[in-house]
Image (spheres, rainbow, N blue to C red):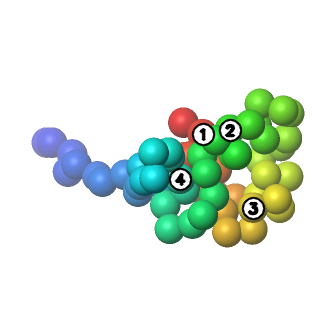
Amino acid sequence: MTAAPTLAKRYIEQRDRGYWIEGTRISLDSVVYASLNGKSPESIAQDFPLLSFDSLPEIAS
């Protein structure tokens, strides 16, 4: 039995010579920098209210 393929939700889009969280004005760079500076996923979600906490692991991978 073969499993049906599943489509992953897209969270990142490329536009204006950069990468952005899909449907927002939040750059991927700003989320990555926050993470590299030691912010927790909870703190990042508070800093960027348009991001859902559930989407952060998907965005980071």
Q: Give coordinates of residue 22: x percent, y percent.
A: 49, 61
**Amino acid type, mark 4:** Trp
The circle drawn on residue 44 is: none
Q: Amino acid at mark 2?
A: Val
- Measured in 3D between alpha carbons, the distance from the residue under mark 2 to the one under mark 4, in whole angstroms, is 11 Å
Report the mark closest to the observer, 1 or 4.
Answer: 4
User: Which structural element holds mark 1?
Assistant: helix
- Identity of the residue drawn at 13% across and 42% down: 1
Q: Earlier in the sequence, mark 2 or mark 4?
A: 4
Amino acid type, callout 1: Ala
Of the numbered discs 1 and 2, the one sitting upstream in the chain is 2
Contact? badges 1 and 2 (CB < 8 Å):
yes
Q: Distance of mark 2 from mark 3, alpha carbons?
A: 12 Å
Q: Please give the residue where the numbered disc 4 appears in the rendered image.
A: 20
- Please state if 8 lies on the left or on the right of 36 as rendered: left
Q: Secondary structure at mark 2?
A: helix
Tell which circle, 3 or 1, labels the residue nearer the N-terminal end.
Answer: 3
Q: For the residues carrying marks 1 and 2, which lies nearer the camera in this image?
A: 2
Alpha-carbon span between mark 1 and mark 4:
12 Å
Residue identified by numbered label 1: 60
Q: Nearer the viewer, residue 61 or 36?
A: 36
Q: Earlier in the sequence, mark 1 or mark 4?
A: 4
Residue 2 visible to an observer of this rendering: yes
From the viewer's perspective, tell me whether residue 14 is left or right of residue 60: left
